[in-house]
Image (cartoon, rainbow, N blue to C red):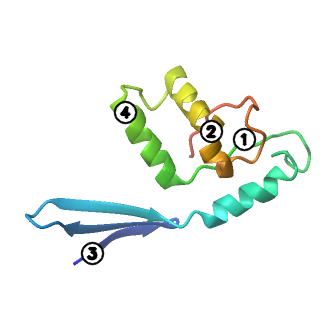
Amino acid sequence: MKRLLNAQGGVVKTFHSEAGGTPVVNTFQDCQAIIDQNREEAKEGGWSPSRELRKKASIPLVVMQQWYTEAQAKGIPWSGEDWKKFVAKKLDDSDNAYFLSAPRKTRFRVAKGD
């Protein structure tokens, strides 16, 4: 039986045990609103209304967690130039284009949430 562990900010975590007792935590997030917002912002090239700021992308938390796990397996820490390059490569991948709100080759900086 699955048990709800946490549900905050649109992210849902559940827990269950597999046959043999192996514990499993699953994390889910409905990312459609983020993708739709990126699509709308892309119509303006990611620029703010004042055109002073340009947003490159919005990446759902569950995707960032997956990328973090991949980076960690490659020995890439959560901060620093290697992490920035890792995220830039992910965003330049056409499979991740729906996270973009600005053209792929736009220069950007990695900003972590508050």
Mark nearest the camera among 2 and 4 is 2
Type of amino acid under label 1: Lys
> What residue is drawn where x is 88% and y is 50%?
44
Q: Name the kind of residue labelled 2 in the image.
A: Leu
- Tell me the crowding category of disc 2: few under 14, some 14 to 19, or many 20 or more residues within 10 angstroms, Cα based: many
Asked whether the beta carbons under mark 1 and mark 2 sit within 8 Å of each other, the answer is: yes
Q: How far apart are marks 3 and 1 (CA)?
A: 36 Å
Mark 2 element type:
helix
The residue at which mark 4 appears reads as: 72
Q: In this view, does 96 lie above or below 74?
A: below
Marker count (numbered): 4
Q: Residue tagged by mark 3?
A: 3
Q: Marks 4 and 3, Cα distance to the nearest angstrom?
A: 28 Å
Q: Residue at x 45, y 32 (%)?
A: 78
Q: Give the image location of residue 77, x and y in percent.
A: 41, 28
Write down the quadrant of residue 2 in the picture. Answer: bottom left
**Which label sits on residue 91?**
2
Nearer the observer: mark 1 or 2; the answer is 2
Furthest residue in direction bottom, as rendered: 1
For label 1, the residue is: 56
The amino acid marked with disc number 4 is: Gln
User: In the structure shown, which secondary structural element does the residue marked by tag 4 occupy?
Assistant: helix
Would you say 7 lies left or right of 30 here?
left
Q: Are marks 3 and 2 in contact (CB under 8 Å)?
A: no
Residue name at image x 50 percent, y 46 percent = 64
- The picture quadrant where one finds residue 31 is bottom right
Q: Which amino acid does label 3 sit on?
A: Arg
Residue at screen point 81% across, 46% down:
46
Q: Pick whichever, 42 or 52, lies toward us.
A: 42
Instruction: Find residue 28 and report its horizontal and vertical position in percent.
Output: 43, 64
- CB within 8 Å, label 4 to label 1: no
Q: How crowded is mark 4: few (under 14 residues within 10 Å), some or many (20 or more)?
A: few
